[in-house]
Amino acid sequence: MRIDEMIAAVQQELGIGVDGKAGPETWGAIYKKICKVTQAEMVQVVGALEPVDARSEKTIATLLPEVQPFARALVQKASANGMTIKILSGLRTYEEQDALYAQGRTAPGNKVTNAKGGFSNHNFGIAFDIGVFEGAKYLGDSPKYKAVGVLGMELGLEWGGNWKTIVDQPHYQLRPVWAANMTERDMLAELRARKASGKGAYS
Ligand SMILES: [Zn+2]
């Protein structure tokens, strides 16, 4: 067995993206599994969770309590690496998601999403989008999105930049432990069911 085949088999077993190359996502998953650290402990590894900038905090307040420290940790980790990011988008209601889905279809504008209400991780408070800034200037396109992506994966976040279908570099989500080996589709179905029955996304 070649080393890349071995890594691919380990990735398969860990339920993460399979590409046969052991990058930060793979090492993060191995670390979590072998060292048996919880997601909360992963954040503590990073350190202080003081409030970040007001704009980000406004968005962070819409996220589930389990996700909030990760968003703050990402802002702080980016800052420690010389990059300014803000959390620009968090929870969206099903109605807000439907309105976004209509854009470029039945409403004016360009298509911005393929997800209807209930089919985006943003509808459950487990996902957020960042913006990279240079001073006060927002950068919609910058190599820094990739650099921040690596930091996010080190925290144990899933990064949209790794997605195969629609690459979404500003996007991050905190996958619940029960969804470790699930497809995105199955995870969303379970999240909808939990929301409908009032069961927490991370319980
Ligand atoms: Zn997003």
Image: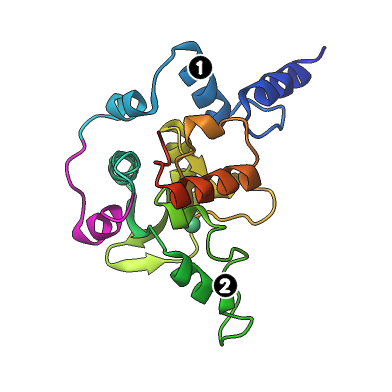
Mark 1 neighbour density, 10 Å: few (under 14) some (14–19) many (20 or more): few
Q: Which residue is mark 2?
A: 101
> x, y percentage for residue 43?
32, 30
Q: Left or right: 180 with respect to 38?
A: right
Left or right of 107 in this view: 173: left
Residue 66 position, x and y percent, is 33, 38
The answer to whether marks 2 and 1 mark residues whose Cβ atoms lie closer than 8 Å is no
In the rendered image, the vertical position of residue 198 relative to residue 25, given as above or below: below
* Left or right, residue 22 beside residue 139: right
Within 8 Å of ligand 1, the CB of disc 2?
A: no
Tell me, yes or no, if residue 144 can be seen here.
Answer: no
* Distance (Cα) linking label 2 and label 1: 37 Å
Question: Which mark's residue is nearer the viewer, 2 or 1?
Answer: 2
Residue 174 point in image, percent of width and height:
45, 40
As drawn, the label of residue 87 is: none
Q: Residue at x 51, y 40 (%)?
A: 158
Who is closer to the viewer here, 195 or 158?
A: 195
Q: Which residue is mark 1?
A: 33
Q: Secondary structure at mark 2?
A: helix
Local secondary structure at mark 1: helix
User: Residue 49: percent from the left, percent from the top?
Assistant: 21, 37
Residue in the image at 43% along x and 38% along y: 151
Question: Would you say residue 55 sits in the magenta stretch?
Answer: yes
Q: What amino acid type should be assigned to the residue bearing mark 1?
A: Lys
Crowd around label 2: few <14 · some 14–19 · many ≥20 (10 Å): some
The residue that appears at 69% across and 20% down in the rendered structure is 7
Q: Residue furthest front?
A: 197
Quadrant including the C terminus: top left
Question: From which residue to which does the magenta span run?
Answer: 49-63
Specify the amino acid type for callout 2. Answer: Tyr
Evaluate whether residue 166 shows in this view: yes
Is the N terminus in the top left, top right, bottom left or bottom right quadrant? top right
